[in-house]
Amino acid sequence: MGLKTIGGTVIRAKHRATCHCGAVELLLDLPDGVVNPRRCNCSYCRRRGTIVAFVPISGLHIIKGAEQLKVYEFNTHTAKHYFCSVCGIHTHHQRRSDPEQYGYNVGCLEGVNPFDIPEVPTSDGVNHPADRKAV
């Protein structure tokens, strides 16, 4: 599903992502592919071990299984972590640091093996900027 040119117009790349059982399917607008993948060391992400990358809210479309998605919120209840209620796989989350973006599970992308990404930096979610008190 890469870039296509039709009549001189570049059509944005669409990528399919699914949970493990296939009950949930997403379509992502990723014109530049997977950009800046990372892990997070917060208590929730550390336990999942997921590599995530980001897309604007308008760039993620649930095309199947919206009724199967469940949401998990903790701490400030700002971030919304979505997972399949059938197989339990985390597909995406609305970010706490930028609620206008979704973080998506790179491992859910069709044709992408997250183990092929050579170096994945870790974000410091334990010391999240939103948790710091104003001085």
Image (cartoon, rainbow, N blue to C red):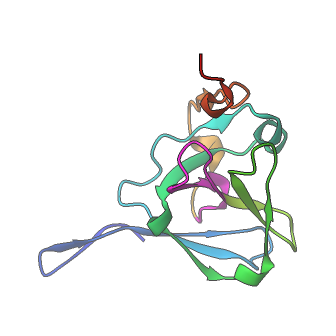
Write down the region rendered in magenta.
93-110
Quarter of the rendering containing residue 131: top right
Q: Nearer the viewer, residue 132 or 33?
A: 132
- Residue 118: x %, y % from top left: 56, 33
Residue depicted at x 78% and y 68%: 20
Q: Is residue 129 above or below residue 74?
A: above
Q: Residue 16 lies in magenta, yes or no?
A: no
Residue depicted at x 48% and y 40%: 36
Q: Nearer the viewer, residue 109 or 96?
A: 96
Position of the N terminus, as image quadrant, is: bottom left
Q: Residue 98 lies in magenta, yes or no?
A: yes
Q: Is residue 82 above or below residue 133?
A: below
Position of the C terminus, as image quadrant, is: top right
Farthest residue, direction left: 8
Quarter of the rendering containing residue 64: bottom right
Count of numbered labels shown in the rendering: 0
Residue depicted at x 47% and y 50%: 34
Q: Is residue 30 above or below residue 47?
A: below
- Residue 59: x %, y % from top left: 46, 66
Residue depicted at x 71% and y 57%: 80
* Residue 2 horizontal side relative to residue 5, left or right: right
Farthest residue, direction top: 135
- Residue 31: x %, y % from top left: 35, 60
Quarter of the rendering containing residue 107: bottom right
